[in-house]
Amino acid sequence: MIKLTNGRGQLGEKLKEKFDSYKTEADVTIYHTWKVPHLYDPKPGEEELIQEKEYLKLVEFSKNNLDTKIIFISTNSNRPTIYTYYKELAEAYLLLNHKSCIILKFPVFIGKGILPKLKSGELKPYGVTEIITLDKVVNAIEEYILYNGLKRVFIIEGEKIEAKTIVEILKA
């Protein structure tokens, strides 16, 4: 049986649609429940507390579900942020403490998250951005549902494009 833990937003909807009737011999949880800062606009000083809370939720979930395979949806961001720090801390915790886990590291999802903020000018474009469609994310997750090998961290690649080009496309 496949469960989706608090799947949020557009990806959560697509995952529910794809895996609602999906059957597996062992219990599998797709852990997609992390609060992303640009989606909730934390107040000054609030972000670290929120990210630590997300980390502790994962630790508690892992401890309470040791017989469940966890597919952890993580980030492939190289930005030195509190969000990235706690995501990587969660990855390390799972690798050391949860025998049956897969960590999938994704670039920025194409959806209602960061793209509208780039389009409106709320976020300023810089450098090269790697983006991925929600359908490609769902397909990548499906590839690892039954995987049981020794390697447990996978970087899923998207398309690399100049952030300024993304803004130009969005304005068209």
Image (cartoon, rainbow, N blue to C red):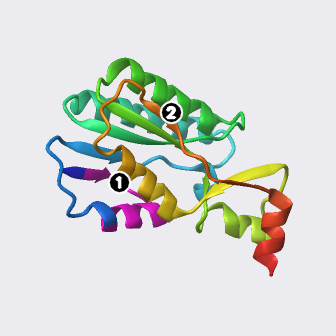
User: Circle 2 is placed at which residue position?
Assistant: 52
Amino acid residing under circle 2: Glu
The residue segment tinted magenta is 3-17
Name the residue rendered at 60%, 47% in the picture. 157
> Can residue 124 be seen here?
no
Residue 84: x, y in percent?
A: 61, 36
> Can residue 81 be seen here?
yes
Of 115 and 20, nearer the camera is 20
Say which quarter of the image contains residue 109.
Answer: bottom right
Say which quarter of the image contains residue 96.
Answer: top left
Residue 163: x, y in percent?
A: 81, 58
Label for residue 6?
1
Amino acid residing under circle 1: Asn
- Asked if residue 122 is among those painted magenta in the image, a careful observer would answer no
Q: Is residue 125 left or right of residue 110?
A: right
Please, is residue 100 above or below residue 118 in the view?
above
- Asked if residue 11 is among those painted magenta in the image, a careful observer would answer yes
Q: Nearer the viewer, mark 2 or mark 1?
A: 1
Residue 81: x, y in percent?
A: 68, 36
Q: Residues within 10 Å of mark 2 (few under 14, many from 20)?
A: some
Name the residue rendered at 22%, 33% in the picture. 65
Q: Secondary structure at mark 2?
A: helix
Of 98 and 149, nearer the camera is 149
User: Spatial distance from mark 2 to mark 1, Cα to Cα?
Assistant: 17 Å
